[in-house]
Image (cartoon, helix red, strand yellow):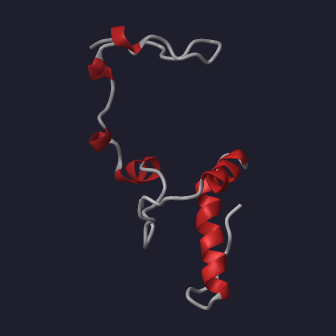
Amino acid sequence: MASRLPMIDKDGEVGDLSKVDPTLFMSFSELPESLQTTLRGRPKAERPKEAVKIRLDADILDALRASGDGWQTRINDTLRASLALAGKVKVSIVRR
């Protein structure tokens, strides 16, 4: 049986794994179900967002992008707020 080499050095850096025997690693399906659930990431949304293509004026898009990361989420929140004011959708909690 091959020895388990340290994958992380004393400084916390991950070493070169290309020279490590791949049989030392477990496949995802071999992990316990409880750990697989934890590692799968964010749970699936009941109604996931849909990718759409939309044409916006250049100055509007520039201003949104200049506001930093999350500008696409802010577009969604702005549209939801506008539609809520018009009574077209229910009001939901705005993410920050």
Q: Quadrant of residue 47?
A: bottom left
Above or below, 42 relative to 45:
above
Is residue 79 visible in the rendered image? The answer is yes
Q: Please provide percent x and percent y for residue 51.
A: 41, 59
Total tally of numbered discs in the picture = 0
Is residue 92 visible in the rendered image? The answer is no
Q: Quadrant of the N terminus?
A: top left
Q: Give the camera-side residue of 42 and 20.
A: 42
Q: Give the camera-side residue of 73 and 48.
A: 73
Residue at image position (65%, 69%) is 78
Residue at image position (70%, 51%) is 63
Q: Quadrant of residue 44?
A: bottom left
Q: Quadrant of residue 31?
A: top left
Above or below, 88 relative to 79:
below
Q: Please provide percent x and percent y for residue 28.
A: 32, 40
Residue farthest bottom in this picture: 87
31 with respect to 5 (left or right): left
Above or below, 6 relative to 79:
above
Q: Give the camera-side residue of 54 and 87.
A: 54
Q: Please provide percent x and percent y for residue 72.
A: 58, 56
Residue at image position (42%, 58%) is 53
Q: Quadrant of the C terminus?
A: bottom right
Residue at image position (46%, 61%) is 43
Q: Please provide percent x and percent y for residue 38.
A: 46, 51
Above or below, 11 relative to 89:
above
